[in-house]
Amino acid sequence: MSFNLTAGNPKAHRIRVYYEGTSTLYEGMPVCYNYDTTTNWSGGSMTLGAVTATTTTAEGSQNEGKYIRVEDPTTANLHAFAGVVAGGSKGIGTTTGLTAIDIYIPNGAIVPVRTDASTTVGVTVLGIANGSTLCASGGAPVAIAWETVDRSSTNGITLAKLDPTMFVRQVGTFNGLTGAVANTMQNTWANTSGSVANLLVHTTANGALAAAHNEWAGLFYLNISGSITAAGYTRCVLAQLNLAGTINHAGSHQYALMAQLSGSPTFTANQRCAGIAIDCSLGVKPISGVYNGLQIANNGANQCEVDHAIEIWGNYGINYLFSFQSCDGITGNFISNGGTGGATKGITSGGNWKKIKVNLEGVDYFMIAYINPTEATFA
């Protein structure tokens, strides 16, 4: 018995659209729908059964041009990815513009895409970007390479699984919704050992960082542009650990939030390295209320007493309890000159002493700091 495999590419689906760009057309070139166009395709509009000859359909009146007209990728239309130009399509190799073309839609099929990347089968992610007519190794991801080939020197074709739904990318506005949640993962794990996680984000940046750069394993940006006129909480990140079971092991640890800095890099030059960095950069202070860099609270009616507001473990050595930088001699800072140390103060010092201002229940107090203090000797 013999089996016949379907010839060609059974999952790949071609459709005909209208290209409005001016770029030279190539097989595998990405295009996006002109999703906000008001130019229709039929050349007319209908109102109460009457047809009017016009090339414009007002926004909100179901203009069919929105799913027929395509253009080159731009920053504004990356979420409207339509597909890639199919081989044998009219206009390939020319810069005709305003022409009907065939494209493969992004439905998970393996199709040829045009790229400038060196791809590895099943590994390299390909994306689209503003002004680019390539599926490059970057931008908004739309595909994964399905063969290993080096196109980094000369742009060309590689097979790729064309499916933007493999990646998380959303652009939208929730209008008039109270308590809306865009994405949710709610899972119950019946594990009795091992490790579980609702979300694992593992990012590896393995390029040589020789120019200005930023890397984030997770980047959270919350922009509040409306007015706040009622009591509430605005939190860019909320980490909440709810303990409800029985905890019965002397070696167990529970942390609502943990930041761990690890590794053994080769440091030849560096400025700062920290487990947690807090940068308070508001341009204005609140008219009333308090502006804090770090706040530790225990103010619930039913909460138990906290043993230590801050606990420091120094098993491997901690050189200083605090390091104050650029905090002395600037108006409004909490450190100021106290005077010259001497025996009359009950302590000798190798130099001037400092006053460190603290606030206790709304009253200013001062802690005293000396340089290399020693016990004073009195006659």
Image: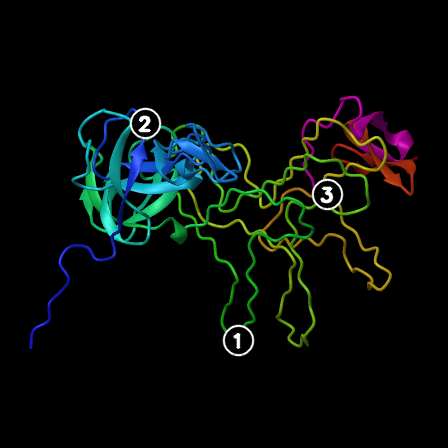
Identify the image quadrant of residue 220.
top right
Is 379 placed left or right of 90 in the picture? Answer: right
Q: Give, as a three-letter code, the residue at label 1.
A: Asn
Secondary structure type for disc 3: loop
At horizontal 78% and vertical 27% (from top left) the residue drawn is 333
Look at the image and tell me whether residue 207 can be seen. Answer: no
- Quick one: label 3, few (<14), some, or many (20+) residues within 10 Å? few
Question: Residue 72 at x, y = what percent?
Answer: 34, 31
Magenta residues, as a range?
322-348
Dot placed on the residue nearer the N-terminal end, 1 or 3: 1
Mark 2 packing: few (<14 Cα in 10 Å), some, or many (20+)?
some
Residue where numbered disc 2 is placed: 21
Q: Say which residue appears at 69% left-offset and 40% top-offset.
A: 322
**If you read the primary sequence from the N terminus, does the residue marked by circle 2 or circle 1 appear first?**
2
- Picture coordinates of residue 221, whole percent (x, y): 59, 40
Inspect the magenta stretch and tell me whether residue 327 lies in it.
yes
**What type is the residue that disc 3 sits on?**
Leu
Report the front residue among 183 and 147. Answer: 183
Check disc 3 and report the residue beneath it. Answer: 294
Q: Nearer the viewer, mark 2 or mark 1?
A: 2
Q: Nearest the camera: 214 or 270? A: 214
Local SS, label 2: loop
Image-based side of 330 in relation to 74, left or right? right
- Name the mark on residue 89: none
Q: Nearer the viewer, mark 1 or mark 3?
A: 1
Q: What kind of colouring is applied to the model shown?
A: rainbow
- Which residue shows up at 87% across the image and 61% down it? 301
